[in-house]
Image (tube, rainbow, N blue to C red):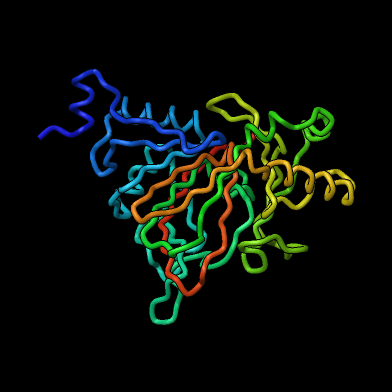
Amino acid sequence: MKSVVQSAQEMGQPPFGVIPLSDAIGAEIVGLDLREPLPQPVFNAIRDTWHAHGVLLFRGQTLDELAQAGFGSRFGELGKVLNNHNGRSYLPGVMYISNVREDGKLVGALPDGEMYFHSDQCYVERPGMATMLYAMEVPAYGGNTLFANMYAAYDTLPESVRSRVEGKLALNVYDYENNATSRGSEPRDGVPSYAHPIVRTHPATGRKALYVNRLMTHHIVGMDRAESDALLEQLFDHQERPEFIYEHVWTPGDLLIWDNRCTLHARTDFDASQRRMMRRVAILGDKPY
C-alpha cells in the first residue's frame, strides 16, 4: 500500500498542508505520519517551512524514542543531555521533562512550575539549534508553552535601542541548582556560561534576531552593571510583548520543533499533583554570530 506521501508526490500535490498557528509565529504541518519514511524532498520542504515560521507543530503523532530521535537527526547532530534522570532514556540525545516519580524518584528534569522565557543551551559555545518536544502526558490545565518571535522583536526595536546593542555581547549562564526555572540573583562560581551576540544572524535565513532572555542572560559584557541591568530589562520586556507570542496548549501526541536561533520559549504554571511527561530531543547548532 502506498503511503500518503508517495500518493501525493505521484499526483503532483504537496505532501502536507500548512496552517499558521498565530499571526506572530508558528505553523501546523498536517497530513504526515512521522513514523513513515520521509523522502529528502519532503523533508527539505518541512525544513523550509520551519525556517519560515520558527515553530512547527505535528499533531496526533505516535512516536517512540527511536522515531523521535531519528526525525530530529534529520535536522542536524543531536545535542548532549545534561540531565538523564535515572537513565530513563537509552539514547544519548533524548531527555525527559517530567514531574512523574517512580519509586519516589523523578524520571525527568524540570518537573514543576512556571519557567521564564529562554533559548535552550545559550550558555555554551554551540547552543542548541532546535528543540523537539513530544507530549506523552499533560495536565488538565496549564503547563502550556509560549513561543516568542525574536525576528519581530529585533525588527521593532527603536533605533535608539538598536544602536546600543549592535555588536555587543551578553553573558548567558546556566545555574541549574539555584535557577532552573526562574531568574535568580547571582550565579554560583563554575557554572556553565558563555557570551554571545545580543543580536545574532540566522545562518539559513540571513535575518537578525534578538538573542538575550530573561532566564539565562546575566549581563552585557563591558557595560556598567546598572546600565546593563536597565538595558536588559528593557529588552526582556520588549521581546515578551503579546503580539510576538503564540501559546501552545498541549494534547498527547503533539510534537513541536522550534528554532532556538530566532525564538524564545517559556512554560506556564500547572498543578504539581497532575502528571506531565514530555520527551525532548535537542539538535546542536553553530556558534552564533
Spot occupied by residue 25 in the image (x, y as percentages of width and height): 54, 36
124 sits to left or right of 14: right
| Quarter of the figure with residue 200 | top right
Q: Is residue 29 visible?
A: yes
The quarter of the image holding the C terminus is top right
Residue at (70, 51) in percent of width and height: 214
State whether residue 16 is above or below residue 186: above
State whether residue 86 is above or below residue 51: below
Residue at (87, 51) in percent of width and height: 225
94 sits to left or right of 199: left
Q: Which residue is the extreme one toward the left?
A: 1
The quarter of the image holding the N terminus is top left
Q: Which residue is the extreme one toward the bottom?
A: 103
Which of these two is toward me, 68 or 287? 68
State whether residue 108 is above or below residue 167: below
Residue at (59, 42) in percent of width and height: 245
Q: Which residue is the extreme one toward the top?
A: 12
182 sits to left or right of 26: right
Spot occupied by residue 115 in the image (x, y as percentages of width and height): 60, 59
Residue at (27, 34) in percent of width and height: 38
Which of these two is toward me, 174 or 43? 43
Q: Is residue 126 visible?
A: no
Spot occupied by residue 154 in the image (x, y as percentages of width and height): 69, 32
